[in-house]
Structures are given as structure tokens and as C-alpha cells.
Image: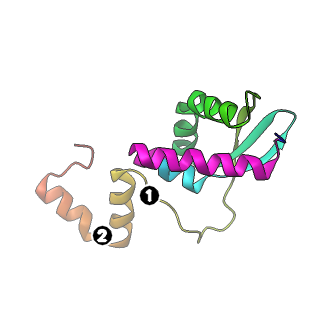
Amino acid sequence: MVVNEETCQKIWEAFTAQLKQKGNTNAFMVFSNTKPMKVEEGWLYVGFTNPLQESILLELKWELQEFFSKQLNGQKIGFKTVFIQEENTNAKKVLYTDEDKLRYLSEKHPLVDELKKKMGLDPNI
């Protein structure tokens, strides 16, 4: 099987669908919003825009390599992560954690902070 960007994209989508089936929501969201960039000399370069995405990608690296190897009939491919600086500050930011969601709401509606303090709420519980 020829290992190129198109082939890797199809395998990536199949792996992402498998994550959804398993109920791994966080990983599914990251893999849905992250795409392989290019294939070069046996390496698949994957772009990410924040450290949380990279950590989830690296956490599933071995499972991903095994999946790719099976799909490529035993052919091995390595993965390298590449940080992508978002140029457009108005781009839609994906909120992953409860803390990110609370921070976003607090920025949009300052009364949320006051309510959080009055009620003694902690988003990490």
C-alpha cells in the first residue's frame, strides 16, 4: 500500500471513528480537530494548536502506530507532532476542560466570577 497524505487521512479518520465507538470523547474531539499534515521519509507529521492536544496525541501514540501498521499491512510509520501557531485570533477556540469553559464564560459574563465566589464553586471537582 502506498503511504501518502490521502491514505493517512483515511486511516486517521478510521482511528477517530474507533475512538468515538469506544466512548473516548476527549480523544475523539482532539483527533477530529487534528489532521495529518504531511508524510515524509516514513514519518507522519501531525499539527496541533495547544499543549492539551499534543498530550492526548502522544498518550495514544502507540495505539495509533499499531492501528496504522495493521491498516498498512505491517508497514511501519512514525509520528511527529508540530505546533501550529494560530494566525487568526478570531478563530473558533475549542474548549476542552471545565476550567477552560469557566474562563470563557467569566470573560464573556463577569458576573460568573462573582457567582462562583459567592457559591464557593470549584470547576475541578
Name the quarter where the N terminus is drawn.
top right
| Residue 49 seen in the figure | no
Quarter of the image where one finds residue 101: bottom left
* Foreground disc of the pair 1, 2: 1
Q: Position of residue 106 (x, y in %)?
A: 33, 65
Q: Position of residue 103 (x, y in %)?
A: 37, 59
- Which mark, by number, is residue 110? 2
Q: Is residue 26 rendered magenta in the image?
A: yes
Name the foreground residue: 50 vs 68: 68
| Above or below 22: residue 32 | below
Q: Which residues are magenta?
A: 3-27
Name the foreground residue: 29 vs 14: 14
Name the quarter where the C terminus is drawn.
top left
Quarter of the image where one finds residue 69: top right
Residue at (54% x, 68% y) in the render: 92
Q: Are marks 1 and 2 in contact (CB under 8 Å)?
A: no
- Residue type of the residue flagged with mark 1: Leu
- Residue type of the residue flagged with mark 2: Pro
Marks 1 and 2, the one that precedes in the sequence:
1
Q: Position of residue 60 (x, y in %)?
A: 54, 33
Residue identified by numbered label 1: 95
Q: Is residue 23 rendered magenta in the image?
A: yes
Position of 71 with respect to 114 (left or right) is right
| Residue 26 seen in the figure | yes
Residue at (25% x, 62% y) in the render: 113
Position of 38 with respect to 15 (left or right) is right
Q: Residues within 10 Å of mark 1 (few under 14, many from 20)?
A: few
Q: Main secondary structure of the magenta part?
A: helix
